[in-house]
Image (cartoon, rainbow, N blue to C red):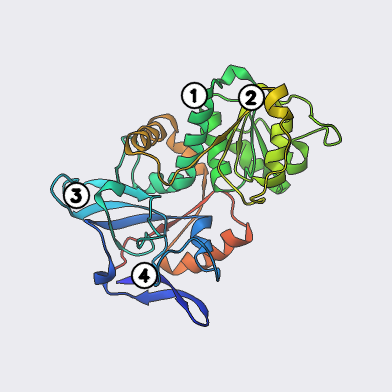
Amino acid sequence: MRAFLVTSTADGITASIEDVDPGILEGEILIQVDVAGVNFKDSMVRVPGNKVARRSPLIPGVDLAGTVLETVEGGPPIGTAVIAHCHGVGVTSHGGFAPLARVPLEWIQPMPPGLDSRSAMILGTAGFTAMASLVALERYGLTPSSGPLVVTGAAGGVGSTSVAIASAAGYEVVASTGRAHEAPFLEGLGASQVIGRDEIDDRPDRTLGTERWAGAIDCVGGPTLSAILRSLRYGGAVAASGLTGGAELTTTVFPFIVRSVALLGIDAVEMGAAERDALWRRLGSDVPHAVIEKLLERTVTLDGVPEALDAIARGGVRGRIIVDLAGED
């Protein structure tokens, strides 16, 4: 079969479309991959010294959706539509950038009502993380009547899906991005306002800024997350899932002890099966298909994966890219 293969060598990393023996695949459940998602994490496996890829050679692709071809006792019947993402998909185990994939039974997610392989992969791990972030904020007490919800890195994968999902749920969403030209795209997803990344905190000269946001979904980290903490309303919270702006967080205790704000960490990788199923079901029921389609930047074939990864690494992608693997063998 043809696959996008990444191999570490003494001279660095090679990444190309190659003919691969399906026998290298490991796992109890064999899936015919219909569609895969393209993520920033996938682009990282090509970087020398990266901490993402845990094996070599590796077929990347942390999101995939398709149909069960081989199963085990207690597993989904042959022909079942499934999703596999997070856990070790495309990291410790071969992923979605090939027409076949094998994964452990516990990594399988039944396709929820309302979604198919295409729509599920337009959402992908980005949409899953966005929904996990919104649910975490709602558990903390956020409702649409609480006030504005700011989303950072709003033109990217997690950010754009967060804008779309929160807007569809009735929230007043303010989209923050460093790409002002993407304002029409974000407004089309439901953002009530689009601001620059430096407009989150209006009083950087003070210990705390103006109380602006009832809640926040932060996909950036670093100074952006610090600015959010300084500008949350009393009792507000931020769900943090990204670090494209830096892994370091410089802040003070004042937002926590003066305004009683909360920092909620979002991990999509090792989440339990019951919660994972509930989140996918909500994605299938609560996000209209017309909204999901607006998130799609483009569809590529397997041959288009290298260029798609380059675009994501440059930060030049808005929304989502998916890989159509129909016809690959």
Taking 122 as reference, is 28 above or below it? below
Q: Is residue 255 left or right of residue 29?
A: right
Q: CA distance from mark 2 to mark 3?
A: 45 Å
Q: CA distance from mark 3 to mark 4?
A: 23 Å
The mark that comes first in sequence, 2 or 3, is 3
Residue annotated with mark 3: 79
Residue annotated with mark 1: 139
> In x, y percent, where is residue 321?
49, 54
Taking 103 as reference, is 20 above or below it? below
> In x, y percent, where is residue 2?
34, 72
Q: Is residue 262 left or right of residue 86?
A: right
Report crowding for label 4: few under 14, some 14 to 19, many 20 or more residues within 10 A (C-alpha). Answer: many
Q: Is residue 287 left or right of residue 213?
A: left
Query: From the viewer's perspective, is the residue at label 1 or at label 4 nearer?
Result: 1
Query: From the viewer's perspective, is the residue at label 2 or at label 4 nearer?
Result: 2
Q: Amino acid at mark 4?
A: Ala
Query: From the viewer's perspective, is the residue at label 3 or at label 1 nearer?
Result: 1
Q: Which secondary structure lies at badge 2?
A: strand
> In x, y percent, where is residue 110?
28, 42
Q: Residue furthest bottom?
A: 11
Taking 8 as reference, is 278 above or below it? above
**Tag 2 and tag 1, C-beta contact below 8 Å:** no
